[in-house]
Image (cartoon, coloured by chain):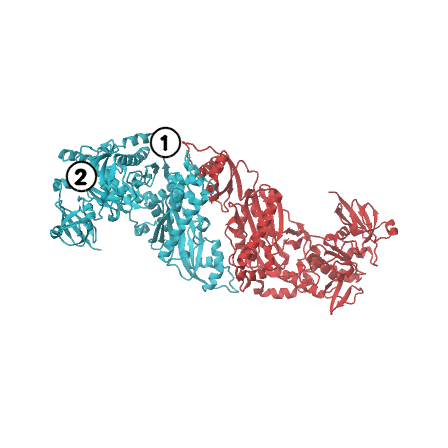
Chain colours: A cyan, B red
Amino acid sequence: MSEYRVVFQPHNKSVIVAEGENLLRAAMEAGVHVNASCGGAGVCGKCRVIVEAGSIEGGVTDKLSPGDVGKGYRLACQSAVHSDLTVRIPVESEVDASVLNKLATPRKTARIHDVDFESLKDQGLFIPPVEKRYLELPPPSDSDRLPDVTRLISYLKAQHNEHRLVARLPVIRKIPDLLRSSGFKVTATLARPVLPGRKSHIINVEAGDTTGRNFAIAVDIGTTTVYGQLIDVISGEVAAQHGEFNAQISYGEDVLSRIVYAEKPGGLEKLHQVVVGTINTIIRKIVRDSGVSLDEISSITLAGNTTMTQLFLKINPRYIRYAPYVPAATLYPPITASNIGLELGDHVSALVYPAISSYVGGDIVAGVMGAGLYRTEDVTLYLDIGTNAEIVVGNKDWFACAACSAGPAFEGGGLQFGMRAAKGAIEDFSIDPVTLEPMLITVGNARPKGICGSGLITIVATFLELGIIDNRGKYHTDLASKRIRQNDGVWEYVLAWAEETQIDRDITLNENDIDNLIRAKGAIFSGYQTLLEEVGLTLDNIDKIVLAGGFGSFVDLEKAMVIGLLPETDPEKITFIGNGSLLGCRMSALTNRLRRDVVEVTRKMTSFELSDTPSYMDHYVASLFLPHTDIDLFPRLKGRMDARRGSSQV
Amino acid sequence: MSEYRVVFQPHNKSVIVAEGENLLRAAMEAGVHVNASCGGAGVCGKCRVIVEAGSIEGGVTDKLSPGDVGKGYRLACQSAVHSDLTVRIPVESEVDASVLNKLATPRKTARIHDVDFESLKDQGLFIPPVEKRYLELPPPSDSDRLPDVTRLISYLKAQHNEHRLVARLPVIRKIPDLLRSSGFKVTATLARPVLPGRKSHIINVEAGDTTGRNFAIAVDIGTTTVYGQLIDVISGEVAAQHGEFNAQISYGEDVLSRIVYAEKPGGLEKLHQVVVGTINTIIRKIVRDSGVSLDEISSITLAGNTTMTQLFLKINPRYIRYAPYVPAATLYPPITASNIGLELGDHVSALVYPAISSYVGGDIVAGVMGAGLYRTEDVTLYLDIGTNAEIVVGNKDWFACAACSAGPAFEGGGLQFGMRAAKGAIEDFSIDPVTLEPMLITVGNARPKGICGSGLITIVATFLELGIIDNRGKYHTDLASKRIRQNDGVWEYVLAWAEETQIDRDITLNENDIDNLIRAKGAIFSGYQTLLEEVGLTLDNIDKIVLAGGFGSFVDLEKAMVIGLLPETDPEKITFIGNGSLLGCRMSALTNRLRRDVVEVTRKMTSFELSDTPSYMDHYVASLFLPHTDIDLFPRLKGRMDARRGSSQV
């Protein structure tokens, strides 16, 4: 796909975008403010720009007079980039370009973690858990009466140098007819031992040469959503993927309500069955989408938080809920997938990622394994941010982990107008520092409906940097804007007026909302601060940050540092792995090294119960400011704030 | 129970019998002939004896006149021994006592194999496959948040020095509630690894201290009958046992007809289900009889012939039936008992004995293991005689085995009046060498109904030694007895006249019947002769003989040597192990040594297909004589025959 350079004037800022990119988003990407209060839906008519050079598609609507169109005006949110462009923003406020440039920072999201299979192979880290071997066997005769399985094993030894093999019962059941119907030309599927020197299991036999087709399934059992991937274990690629809501949602929204439901008569069985049902739905979908047959799938790896894992395995999660919060087990033996109800061949083993504690589960362990934290000297901070945030710090020699209840703010919960990152959610934001008029971009460029987590962070960070709120998250009520107002005694900023929204109400962010965010980020910041302190380190020792979870993908990293969610660091050190749980499962499907190493990793990982750790409360209270009571922890922000106070525009 | 000495005159032979023993059976035991043609039912009135000293119970019937009773006459078959006795047999024939003594040999059955647990323990051969450990655990607290399973494993290590433990899923499911309901006082059941250095599996946890109760099940899956035993694995004793007809009988009497049925649509599934049903019936019965709860049973071991094993495991046995007669597999992996349909706890593993070939199955391997053949330098001949006879020869270093189709003669099949050893079956026999009148003893002392295998051997051996038949099994038709007659052109001997029987027909043994027996014993004799020859040995190298199967228990060993079924040897070298398959399963329930050693034994065992072994047919033809073409193979018999020809009475 072609890429084009867009230069914005008078800022003289440029950005490279893909062909067809929305021009309003391009401006936001470049750190250029354009008033826009309808999220990019073309309704408010405010995002007027003048195309000075190059050509765009669209941008002409009835919000523009024919005269304006003649002068080159277009609505940025309705324009798509199709060449290099020069675009002028009619600066309505009185700030000049040099000030604008100081105020806005380009959007910077985390680098996507890239799995470099070739490099991993070169390092000898790939030990296929399942391999196939093709054989042409002599048929039995009066002078060669080897039993069918013995024949297969003998020739695997002779032709493929395979030793220490045992056949599973489904193979023994299948082999007599298969050998004869295939003319004694078969492919054997071998499941490799996790520990060296142990036996390989012959888990399947197929007619003819099927060595080119070998698949595995990876599943993340999320409390809300279950994601599955079909992995081509020969190429390492994802052949198909699909997500479904966890059908357990009907029995409770969150982990605790699921545990409560599981305590009812039949409740555990029910929750077990419906999540297995959800996984089966996903398996059917990805198998259908990819044209792979069920018989070609040789393994499945699953991970979830400790409660999801126990419910999947039909283990009573009751004691996770009561102090001292003890799970039944943290290591789970391999099980036969069909025995647990999964609609896979009876040769398929299911591997379930081990947990660390009741609140740091297999999903986190999978993420740590998938991201390779355990193979490097670098001290890495791993954050999986949701209602419950899980934190891991460590390197190849040690790990410390904890979970903290961040509250649902990052998932858009607990706010007046909070929502998930669905269509109409305000996901990006800028403000004119003089007029205080907003630039809103919503998911899907739809009229605003609410605010999602990444939008919230950007709004609050912007407010803080421009002095619209103070470091306690309180509005400067003396600013001249009708958007800053008191409502039922609570101060708020109006992001979008009722007529611009989908909900016919003003969408606002009030001080209670900001307070929720401060408490959420404070819980997380003080969480990793405490963990580091417990192992004798400080924030300065963090070499890398890995963000996991749906949340991390859209977060503007600089903004997350401004509010004190992330420590101030070079954004290049931060990577985003997406669904870490799924990544770990995928990697386990590809190499036995992970299966071998994961037990060691769980042994090296010390779980801290933050509520038991005396320093945690002190750190937490100190972090209930923007970015923190101790501004010296955020020197870059401090410098910008000092400079801004010096220029005194605001 | 008291024992008494009974002296028979004029023979001056004595025997020690238990109180209450039947006097006719005592005479047979002593090798004393008493005419008796109704099997001991008190009907023919022929077994008149005079009690000269001591007292008996019974013996007076209306078959005796008051005068006879006054003279001390009693019917032996109606008399029970209750003191030391002297009994005179009214010798009606003209042979004197010295001749009588030459003709009859005392009945000698095989010594019952005795399992000497203490000696095996002393030799270090007992490694319990399943052990229990009692623990009192500290409950979790804020300062001790070990997960439940980790807690159990840690304290098993601390309190019992148990290492390398893994918990199975059913244990993980059970442990949270069990720990708390038991006050953290539990017993863990540990399944030991078969190979040293591997992991022990925690397969069960129970509340409180249950270390004193630990049970296993042993099952022989016979084609006709399935036997089960409940084993107390602490004492090694059999706590309960029960046999049931294999419900597969409705779908075919023998192995081949079962295979044919299994080829029909749904046939394999059906046969699998019904034999599992039979085993479940047995389990319910022995559990109920012994008052043991299902939860106290930790393992089950099963053995059967190759077809029975494949049907139990739902493995298509089709190719066992077609040349070159190849089984699907000979080693079967351990399976979860409940997965295969057995009504046992889901912590129970089922171990199925490995087979050698299509016709030497796990039942034979189990017998070889149970009888300890693989632990001695002695070359042992192991015979399991039924319709198919299985033969093993070998010692701790090597084994050779084969199966041969003996035909059903030893099970009473294929004869005019053959029957199983049920009530009314002629099981023992003697003959008056002059009058040729018989002495019949039947199972249950009922009127004769037919002839069972051990009776057949004794009759034919007696006929041969007394010159009633020749070495081709043909009657000497010139003997003066109305019992020897021609019927439809075939010569026969009338064992019982119609009015003495239960079936209102003369019960006879004709030359076709004898021919059947000769072919059956010839197949077996030539079978082990061939096996020995193949490994470079001869009959003289046999140090011990082990007889297995229901057949062996009643066989008069000397008679079996006379007909050439067994090689001539000291009867003291012969032991009877009963159901070898069941014995092997019982032993496997008691020691992992067997589980470890059995794979090695199957590797050391060379299977011969006799029909492929050129010398077999020559040996077979040579053995179609009584005892054999080469009488020098039976020097003791030759000596007796020569002596008898010298005395020339007959």
Q: CA distance from mark 1 to mark 2?
A: 44 Å
Asked if the residues shown at circle 1 and circle 2 are in contact, with their CB atoms under 8 angstroms apart, the answer is no
Q: Is disc 1 surrounded by few (<14), some (14 to 19) or many (20+) residues within 10 Å?
A: few
Q: What subunit carries mark 2?
A: A
Q: Quadrant of the N terminus of chain A?
A: bottom left
- Three-letter amino acid code at the position of disc 1: Asp
Whether residue B550 is visible to the viewer of this picture, yes or no, is yes
For residue A436, the mark is 2
Q: Give the mark toward the camera: 1 or 2.
A: 2
Image coords of residue A543 (percent x, y)? 27, 40
Image coords of residue B589 (percent x, y)? 56, 46
Labels 1 and 2 within one chain: yes
Q: What subunit carries mark 1?
A: A
- Tell me the quarter of the picture where residue B262 sits: bottom right
- Tell me the quarter of the picture where residue A484 sits: top left
B604 lies left or right of B441: left
A60 lies left or right of A205: left
Image coords of residue B225 (percent x, y)? 62, 54
Q: Nearer the viewer, residue A474 or B641?
A: A474
Image coords of residue A298 (percent x, y)? 41, 53
For residue B501, the mark is none
Q: Check disc 1 and report its element: helix, strand or loop.
A: helix
- Residue at image location 60% in from the left, 60% down from the top: B252
B460 lies left or right of A451: right
Whether residue A108 is visible to the viewer of this picture, yes or no, is no
For residue A612, the mark is 1
Q: Quadrant of the C terminus of chain A?
A: top left
Count the marks.
Answer: 2
- Tell me the quarter of the picture where residue A156 sits: bottom left
Q: Check disc 2 and report its element: helix, strand or loop.
A: loop
Q: Is disc 2 surrounded by few (<14), some (14 to 19) or many (20+) residues within 10 Å?
A: many
Q: Nearer the viewer, residue A42 or B19?
A: A42
